[in-house]
Image: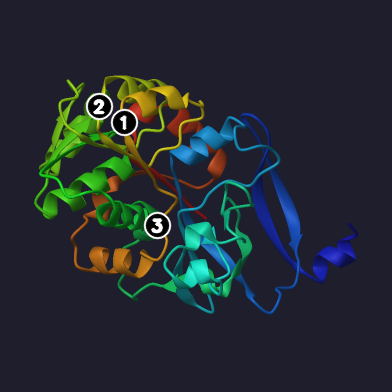
Amino acid sequence: MSSETLKSKAVGKVWRLTRPGHFEVEEVAIPKPTAEQVLVNVKSVGVCGTDIHGSMGILGTPLVLGHDGEVVWKGKRFTVDPALVCRRCDECLSDRSYACAEYRFLGMNTDGLFATQVLLPERSLHELPENFPENAATVLEPIAVALRVKDRIPSSDRVTIIGAGPMGLVIGLLLSKSGMEISLVEPKANRRAFAQSWGLHAEESTSYQDHLYIETSANDLATKHLLEAAPAGSTICMVGAPATEYSMRNLLLKDFSIIGMRGGAGRYRAAIALVQAEVIPVADLVTHTFDNPVDAVTQVRDHGDEIIRAVINF
């Protein structure tokens, strides 16, 4: 591309995964937005388990990762619903946008927010209040997912949650506030301590006596053990997405009910309201900040025991 062409368009910087474990920093000319798109500046983006797994190449390459974030457009702050859908079809209009035929998810099957500027559908933006806490938008997706989990799981007095990362912590706190008895299972001592600081019961392992489980770790071994050890007739809500495929045999013979969870469709405004009401103490979750995706992903991957939520500030 000629220098004249670059000068005629907005130029942004992207951190593109070109092969497993390897990012390349590129300056790219950003095309003119279509009628439904807007050009936004990325202010901050969180690093979650999906990004760590994605950096290992399981989502394919080349790919720009990142989906939990805050952007600025026309001087105003917005969060982004990373599920890109049409908002016009019967599925979208019936609160089932996860089934939209045009469904794409930022940083998974289309380029995401590890960039300084991106084009996004205007309909995917949700304006933030002026006094919204810094970096809080990077944990709105876990809160939106937690709201969907609360709506979809069966009524129960108790639930065991596998994994005490940001997703498991937020789900646990939200369900505990609705009156459920929560048990978080987490092998990392610092995350158990964090859960306990929120008043949540956390243990290193479980005897699998409950009949309702929420899997948030996306860990292959943890998921395998859950499917083997959970009592027959259990309901298992799969929020994490482990890379390993599993046989249906165990699910059928143990009469499990499996609930899939594809994002926080339609729950972002409610998630913003929860943060505004200080129901979820989001400032506690962000323990580390970085100025570029390479350092952030490397540190979370290699020193994850010390980090609850890492955020990249551009």
- Secondary structure beneath label 1: loop
Q: Nearer the viewer, mark 3 or mark 1?
A: 1
Circle on res. 255: 1
Residue 44 horizontal side relative to residue 132, left or right:
right
In three-dimensional space, the C-alpha distance between marks 1 and 2, rounded to whole angstroms, equals 6 Å
Q: Please tell me how crowded label 3 is: few (under 14), some (14-19), or many (20+) other residues with Cα within 10 Å.
A: many
Query: Where 195 sits versus 275, above or below?
Result: above
Q: Please tell me how crowded label 2 is: few (under 14), some (14-19), or many (20+) other residues with Cα within 10 Å.
A: some
Residue 260 horizontal side relative to residue 18, left or right:
left
First along the sequence among labels 2 and 3: 2
In three-dimensional space, the C-alpha distance between marks 2 and 3, rounded to whole angstroms, equals 29 Å
- Secondary structure beneath label 2: loop
Q: Residue at x 45, y 54 (%)?
A: 68
Residue 270 in the image: state x and y as whole percent. Answer: 30, 68
Quadrant where the N terminus sits is bottom right
Give the residue number, with chain letter if any, for mark 2.
232
Give the residue number, with chain letter if any, for mark 3.
264
Q: Which of 297 and 162 lies nearest the eye of the viewer?
A: 162
